[in-house]
Amino acid sequence: MSYLSPNMSGFQFSVGMKDTTKYSDATSYGAQYAMTAGDATVTLKYAASNTGKTSSTATDEVDATSTALVIGMGGATLTIAQNTADVGTTAKYENSGAAVAYVISDALTVEAYSGEVENDKDADYKFKDTGYGITYTVTPGMTLSVTHNSWDYTSNAAASDDGTNTAVALNVSF
């Protein structure tokens, strides 16, 4: 069951719940406020959720929050986000990230982002991902995207990884 409020002078909220009649029930809520400031649009966002444990003896309940600021001006959009996920007794992830997109023309957009995750319950855990890309509209309903990202991951002294990836995608919608 969920509810999305009408937009009230830039403010909107939603609430939801899932009753499984056993375990893993879920609740969530969120709100956002959008306004203009001169030539810029500014949107503040907040969301939170809880998913119950999977059994009576489990310790895997998940509490998560997300806060974001989105600023748009001209063809540029900047998004800054802070997220947390508290996973029972095993992990408390904290993530921060930022992304920027710029619309060069009706057919071409460039994007870049960077994000980092840490686990407060495991000092060795770290993940960082940085990337950039372009999206080209070939024709209405068809876009070609190229993205490149690099990551660095460590979960303990014995488990670490880093690398890069480039992906090409052709998206078609009708």
Image: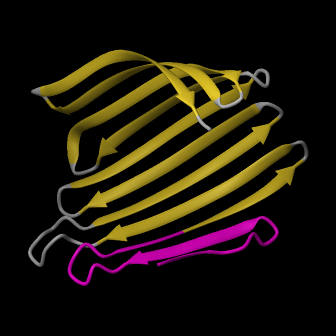
Q: Is residue 70 above or below residue 6?
A: above
Determine the residue positioned at 14% across, 28% down.
Answer: 159
Q: Nearer the viewer, residue 24 or 127?
A: 24
Q: x, y percentage for residue 10?
A: 78, 64
Looking at the image, residue 83 sits to the left or right of residue 87; the answer is right
Q: x, y percentage for residue 84?
A: 40, 54
Q: What's the image's color scheme?
A: secondary structure
Q: x, y percentage for residue 162?
A: 28, 19
The reply to whether the magenta stretch includes residue 2 is yes
Looking at the image, the residue that sits furthest to the front is 174
Within the image, what quadrant is residue 141 found in? Answer: top right
Looking at the image, the residue that sits furthest to the bottom is 21
Q: x, y percentage for residue 152?
A: 31, 24
For the magenta stretch, what is the residue range? 1-29
Determine the residue positioned at 33% across, 80% down.
Answer: 19
In the rendered view of the protein, which quadrant contains the C terminus?
top right
Determine the residue positioned at 25% across, 84% down.
Answer: 21
Determine the residue positioned at 66% across, 75% down.
Answer: 5
Looking at the image, residue 57 sits to the left or right of residue 53; the answer is left
Q: Nearer the viewer, residue 86 or 56?
A: 56
